[in-house]
Every structure is written in structure tokens, then in C-alpha cells.
Amino acid sequence: MSVSVTRDRRLRIPLKATYKIIITNPDGSIAQVIEGKNDDPFTYSFVWLFYGSLIAPSQPTDIPDVAGTELFLFTPAVPTSYQGAAAAIPYPASLSAS
Amino acid sequence: MNCPGTPNAPYAVKLPGIWLFSTPFSGQPMVSSIYSYLITPITYYTPSISPSISATVGATNTITITQNFTNTSGSPITIYSFAVVAALYPVTSSGLAGTPYFIDIAYFNLSTAVVWSPAAGMTVQASFQVPT
């Protein structure tokens, strides 16, 4: 039997991040399996990438790359005059609804 | 050389995917804080991604990244955490730069440290279930 519930009554499942690690012996047999989860998996940089992807910030934001280099995120393009480490989120600012 | 949009950092691992660390994340979860603990005397193989996305109302979509590793160090390695790292290619006036920046997207602290023996293989899977 199936039970149908409306969307606002359904248990909401947030973003869920899980992992599984499988270690194998040199002969290919499985030596160990480890599983776990992280309910809040996102890093500092991801939050700013997400933000920059949603809108076109008026000011560039800086995030560290994995090695610690400060990387400036421009939208929609890196100004030609800027000489530092930078990347662009090519937000289609010139598009408009018609 | 410091050209605009050109990465300068000589990364120890050259491909995006899952990066392994010999210390856990704490405080602000940033790979740059524990970059010196990146486990490098091993082989990182190219990851694969399996999306299962239907994105209808009420559906749960799953994206799984899988990567294989081999301990070629000759010694046991203890793993405390790993990160999912993306490659961000700078846009230049002549197109995409040939070398990416690597940006950490997600992190996982292992509930128990894993001791990884020499010559043993390892597969790590990270799955993200995204409800719509």
C-alpha cells in the first residue's frame, strides 16, 4: 500500500553527503570498508563560488585556492588591467528577457 | 610570471577529484589550511562522476564521485580526511587558460583514521544527495 502526502507534509531531506572507502589487498580482495557522512560538507570557498554564481557581485570576491593563493573572482570577466591571480564567472549580464 | 588569470601555484596534485590528507579539517574548512598535510607519495587516478539527476519536485538526486588510489610510498599511510576539489579554469582574452586553479568544494573528516598499507589499493566514493 502506498500513502500519498502533500509536499508540505512530507519529511524534507536536506542535502546529504556520504562517503565510502574500500581498501583492497594486493590480490584484489577487499580488506576494509569504511562508511560515513557529513551533513555539512561544504567548504569556505564553495560558499563564495555559489554566491558569485547566483548574482553578479559589484565587487570581486577573493577566495583561497587549495595552496592558499588568494584568487579574485570577477563577474563577468577579469578586467584586462588586473594583474593578479583571478578567474571569472561569466555571468550573462548582457542578456535580458524579451 | 604573473599574467592575469594565470595560476602561479605549483600544485602537488595535478588533477581535480578527491584529495587525501593526514590531518582532519577543523575551524573554517579550507584545504589551504591543511595543504601541507596533503598525501602525495601515492598515485591519484582520474576520478569518475555518476550523476543520477531527475530534478522533479520531490526527487532526490545523487551525484557520486569515485576515485582510485594506490599506496606507492612503501610505508603505511594514515588518512584522517579528504576533500573534493574542482578545477577552475581562468578565462583569458584568448580563451581558457591551460592550467586550472584548484578550489576545494567539500570536505569529509573520517570518523576513524584509516591506516593504508603499502601496495594496497583504495577506492573512495563521495556521494551528494540533493533534494529538489
Image (spheres, coloured by chain):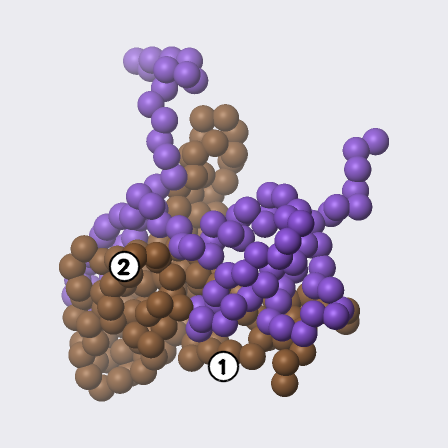
Chain colours: A purple, B brown
Q: Is residue A80 above or below residue B61?
A: below
Between residue A67 and residue A6, name the one nearer to us.
A67
- Percent x, y of residue B114: 18, 66
Marker disc for residue B115: none
Image quadrant where one finds the N terminus of chain B: bottom right
Which amino acid, by three-letter code, is at mark 2? Ser
Residue displayed at 45% across by 30% down: B59
Q: Residues within 10 Å of mark 1 (few under 14, many from 20)?
A: few
Quadrant housing residue B110: bottom left
Q: Is residue B66 above or below residue B78?
A: above
Q: Is residue B122 above or below residue B12?
A: above
Residue A86 appearing in the image: yes
- Percent x, y of residue B109: 26, 57
Q: Nearer the viewer, mark 2 or mark 1?
A: 2
Residue displayed at 26% across by 84% down: B73
- Percent x, y of residue B132: 47, 31
Quadrant housing residue B90: bottom right
Q: Residues within 10 Å of mark 2 (few under 14, many from 20)?
A: few
Q: Label 2: state its secondary structure.
A: loop
Q: Check chain identity for marks 2 and 1: say if they share one.
A: yes
Which amino acid, by three-letter code, is at mark 1? Pro
Residue displayed at 40% across by 54% down: A43
Query: Could you tell whether B42 is left or right of A59 in the image?
Result: left
Q: Which residue is mark 2?
A: B26
Q: Which residue is mark 1?
A: B10
The answer for which chain carries disc 1 is: B
Q: Earlier in the sequence, mark 2 or mark 1?
A: 1
Quadrant housing residue A67: bottom left
